[in-house]
Image (cartoon, rainbow, N blue to C red):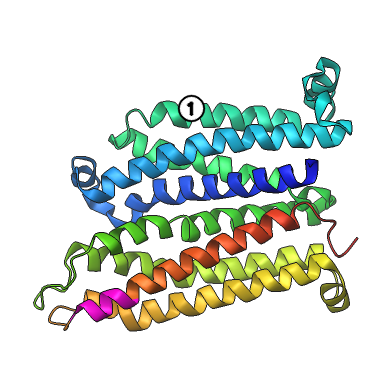
């Protein structure tokens, strides 16, 4: 029960925090100099982004509480000990997990308070900043903290980069799904699909950078956690990692097709944008979303296993 509860709470928390960071960051790079116009807009994207942010912060709080409960229960050997004050005191004073989780709960409450004012200009910068801390702090709960010395510093820095870029890329996909499904069935032949095309061009433009950083940081993390090709192939951890990489490569292939094949049709004035192109794009973004959830499931499982190197 403890292990299953921890895996589920980890999965829900990763989904919540990735979505929170990606959705909060989305307007900053897709609308750039038009943030005032975005903040004053009551269009479907603004409405849905608010819903995503509110839902994500609620899920982040509940799943963080579940993560804390199941981790404390695992440390004590019995979930019933979670209400034992001596056990709670030991977790808070004798482990890194307790103080880190207090800081994370404070951040969640601060974000929830700021969402009351979102998308006012200051909150549009403060929410992604705090969400970024919330996401990056997950590196303190993973396997990176077991690496000592300067290699440990490199490992934690790489893990933080991996988490933040994953939130930027994976978390930003949900707003893109909303945009694509809110688009008209056929665009204007003279202007493509207008704002949709521009936003998708900007989002696609980050894809190459995001994939490169994810690959580089993933290689560094794997070097510390796997150690050898033999361990990669013979351990459960290694085989799950291979599955994660395979799914990621499929996502990268779909993103490449979107970047160089479909998105140019939306960005180029005069293109014959039709219902068929839109249907293809909708299919691709749904595939990417489903594959992204599979990656998060595997990440949740990997975090509960011993690294292959050990």
Query: In terms of image quadrants, where is residue 278?
Result: bottom left
Residue 231 within the magenta-colored segment of the rendering: no
**Image quadrant occupied by the C terminus:** bottom right
The residue most toward the top is 85
- On the image, the x and y values in percent for residue 183 come to 22, 64
Q: What element carries label 1?
A: helix
Residue nearest the viewer, comparing 187 with 37: 187
Residue pictured at 21% horizontal, 43% vertical: 36
In this view of the protein, can residue 87 be seen by the observer?
yes
Q: Magenta part of the protein: which range?
A: 273-280
Residue pictured at 33% horizontal, 74% vertical: 281
Residue 278 within the magenta-colored segment of the rendering: yes
**Image quadrant occupied by the N terminus:** top right
In this view of the protein, can residue 96 be seen by the observer?
no
Q: Is residue 98 above or below residue 222?
A: above
Q: Is residue 210 above or below residue 48?
A: below
Q: How many marks?
A: 1
Residue pictured at 53% horizontal, 31% vertical: 108
Residue 94 shown left or right of residue 182 in the figure? right
Query: In terms of image quadrants, where is residue 229?
Result: bottom right
Residue 104 shown left or right of residue 226 in the figure? left
Within-10-Å neighbours for mark 1: few <14, some 14–19, many 20+? some
- On the image, the x and y values in percent for residue 260 come to 36, 82
Residue 26 shown left or right of residue 90 in the figure? left
- On the image, the x and y values in percent for residue 71 come to 77, 37
Q: Name the residue under label 1.
A: 110
């Amino acid at each position: 029960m403890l292990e299953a509860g921890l895996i589920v709470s980890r999965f829900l928390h990763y989904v919540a925090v990735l979505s929170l960071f990606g959705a909060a960051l989305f307007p900053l790079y897709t609308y750039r100099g038009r943030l005032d116009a975005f903040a004053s807009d009551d269009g479907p994207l603004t409405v849905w982004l608010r819903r995503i942010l509110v839902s994500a912060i609620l899920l982040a709080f509940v799943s963080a509480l579940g993560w804390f409960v199941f981790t404390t229960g695992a440390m004590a050997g019995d979930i019933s000990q979670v209400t034992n004050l001596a056990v709670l005191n030991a977790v808070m004073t004798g482990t890194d997990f307790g103080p880190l989780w207090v800081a994370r709960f404070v951040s969640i409450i601060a974000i929830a308070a700021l969402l009351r004012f979102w998308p006012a200009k200051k909150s549009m910068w403060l929410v992604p900043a705090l969400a970024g801390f919330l996401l990056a702090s997950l590196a303190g709960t993973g396997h990176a903290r077991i690496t000592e010395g300067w290699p440990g510093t490199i490992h934690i820095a790489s893990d933080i980069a991996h988490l933040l870029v994953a939130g930027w890329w994976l978390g930003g996909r949900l707003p893109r799904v909303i945009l694509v499904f809110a688009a008209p069935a056929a665009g204007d032949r003279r202007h493509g699909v207008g704002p949709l095309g521009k936003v998708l061009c900007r989002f696609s433009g980050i894809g190459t950078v995001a994939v490169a950083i994810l690959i580089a940081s993933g290689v560094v993390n794997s070097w510390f956690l796997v150690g050898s090709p033999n361990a990669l192939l013979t351990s459960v951890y290694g085989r799950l990692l291979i599955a994660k990489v395979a799914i990621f490569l499929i996502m990268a292939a779909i993103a490449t097709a979107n970047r160089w094949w479909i998105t140019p049709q939306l960005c180029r004035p005069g293109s014959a944008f039709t219902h068929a192109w839109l249907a293809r794009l909708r299919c691709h973004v749904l595939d990417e979303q489903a594959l992204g959830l599979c990656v998060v499931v595997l990440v949740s499982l990997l975090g509960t296993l011993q690294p292959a190197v050990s």
